[in-house]
Amino acid sequence: MQDRAPLEDEAQVFSGIVKVWRSDYGELLTDSGVTVPLVTSGYRPVPVGARVTLVARKYKPLFQIDRIVDGA
């Protein structure tokens, strides 16, 4: 029996304000007030305070970004 990959199959869309964005980790404060931890490796820097919408999949316990839909 193979172990499941830590990356979940279903993608989710989040919109909100960037609280933290480093080369490998970020946090998005969503419009509903939830802070979503993100894996940001491989993505261009996004300024703190920027409003973005992104598509991500849960990468236990963080979310791996699939793509940034709009924003800075």
Image (cartoon, rainbow, N blue to C red):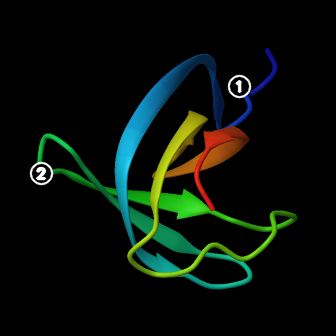
Mark 1 lies on a secondary structure that is: loop
| Residue at (56% x, 39% y) in the render | 54
**Mark 2 vs 1, N-terminal side:** 1
| Residue at (74% x, 28% y) in the render | 3
Answer left or right for 45 relative to 15: right
Answer left or right for 19 relative to 11: left
Answer left or right for 62 relative to 28: right
Q: Is residue 39 above or below residue 46?
A: above
For disc 1, the neighbor class at 10 Å (few under 14, some 14 to 19, many from 20) is: few
Give the residue type at disc 2.
Answer: Gly
Give the residue type at disc 1.
Answer: Arg
* Horizontal and vertical percent position of residue 72: 63, 62
Q: Are marks 2 and 1 in contact (CB under 8 Å)?
A: no
Q: Which residue is mark 2?
A: 33
* Horizontal and vertical percent position of residue 56: 59, 36
- The front one of 41 and 48 is 48
Mark 2 lies on a secondary structure that is: loop
* Horizontal and vertical percent position of residue 34: 18, 50
Residue 19: image tag: none
Q: Which residue is mark 1?
A: 4
| Residue at (20% x, 44% y) in the render | 31
- The front one of 61 and 53 is 53
Given this view, does label 2 or label 1 mark the residue nearer the observer? 2
